Image: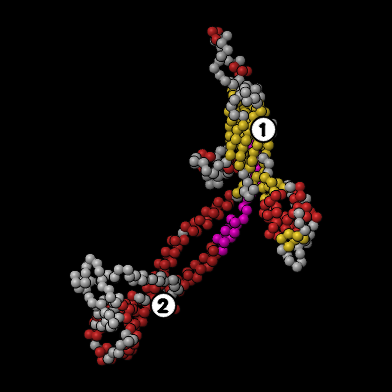
Amino acid sequence: MRSFQGQQPPGPMRGGLGPSGPSVPTGQQFTGPRGPANARPGAPVPPPPNQPGPAPRFVRKPTDKNINPKVQAIIPESKLYSNLLEAEKSLDAVISRKKLDLQDSLSGNMKRTCILRLCISNTATDQPWQLMDREIPEENLFDFDTGMNPSWCLRIEGKLLNGDGKLIEDTEESPRPKLSSLLQSLVIELDRSEELYPDSNVIEWHQSKKSSMPPEAQEWDAIEVRRKGDENVNARILIQLNEFPDYFKFSDELSKVIPVQCATKPAVVMHIWQYIKYRKLQDPSDKRTVICDDALRQLFGQDHIQFPQIIELLTNHLKPLEPIEIFYTINVEKAAHHAENYYDIKIEVDDPMRKEMTKTLESCYDIAPELAALDEHVCFGIQELNALKSKREFFTMLYSDPASFIKTWTASQSHDMDVLLADRTLNNELIRRADMFKDPEILRESIQLLLNR
């Protein structure tokens, strides 16, 4: 193959096609495993090195699902499909609205108030008073080493009750939260001598999200602590609840503004806004500016503040809640001992409907690919139906008046040929002959135009 320098290569070079295939840049030749001399006749020649290949074809998928009115005139039953399509649009609108309602509900605080009832008890084993009731052989009457160590077991159990005081059952369909998921930490302090009892007298448990144990093994409803001892022990139990969002207690200055003992940070900001709005403390010229009264001046230490500054200024007035403190005496004078009272704590847990609503939304997203595939299948069917309609119109017109139709059709094809070969002048007499359409150059131009569509 020769390169063309300073002259136009023979044949039309429009679109990179000519009688001998793709055009070659000036001064370059094709290289590869098959050289120019060894190239097989008619074989496609690879592009030269460092030259971009042909642009990938973009295939547009059909998106129209509506039947052409002309098809409805031919097939009256297609009206049922149109009715079904309208029903589908109405159903999609309802589903979309419900999905938005579910998302809006899930973004809110879906909580319900329950009662966490703590039951504290202990058992005693191998205590001296328990060994006195046992029969001892005569040969061991003076043997004071019995080989048994007196011990006790402290048990803390949690039960979840609804607002009416009824126990919430744990079922597979609606599992209730375990005690471990409701606590952030649990600390038990034993008031006894470390010299006589070297075992740890401070027992701590903290919720950890990075544990290697499976979630089922980390959840529990009761915790037991076993220690050696034959004396009553005073225990101090500290419980920190696992709350989201976190609750805070207030400083003295903030307590004068908000008439509650504790609240979340968003709730505190809302209380401040209601206080400002009720007392009309906004600057009339700039609503973002707050004119502080005596209470707000003591709280923020300024005469004027911008409303976005409130969140930052409130940080120093919010303190973590102190843990719940329970005192219990471990009694080893009885085989089993229970606390005189139960300890009820009001808590907020996730509403069971939240999990059901989440599953419903996930199911909608799971079937989305399947629905998209069905819509695409319907669109291809409509496209094929429109193509059959065009064929039917073609043959109907040919059947009605063959001579006029062929004349009109030939003129249309001639016009299309003029568009394809815009830079060439063709003889109408040549166009009438079939040999012209066998010209490989015209075929290449036509194929190239069709492929680029």
Q: Residue at horizontal 55%, vertical 10%?
A: 140
First to last magenta residue range: 97-118
Quadrant assignment, res 38: bottom left
Instruction: State the residue position of label 2.
Output: 71
Instruction: State the residue position of label 1.
Output: 236
Q: Residue at horizontal 67%, vertical 47%?
A: 247
Quadrant assignment, res 105: bottom right
x then y, percent, for residue 108: 62, 55
Left or right of residue 428, residue 217 in this image: right
x then y, percent, for residue 150: 59, 21
x then y, percent, for residue 427: 27, 91
Q: Secondary structure at mark 2?
A: helix
Q: Quadrant of the C terminus?
A: bottom left
x then y, percent, for residue 81: 45, 71
Contact between labelled residues 2 and 1, with CB atoms less than 8 Å apart: no
Of the pair 215 and 47, the residue shown nearer to us? 47
Q: Earlier in the sequence, mark 1 or mark 2?
A: 2
Of the pair 341 and 332, the residue shown nearer to us? 332
Q: Residues within 10 Å of mark 1 (few under 14, many from 20)?
A: some
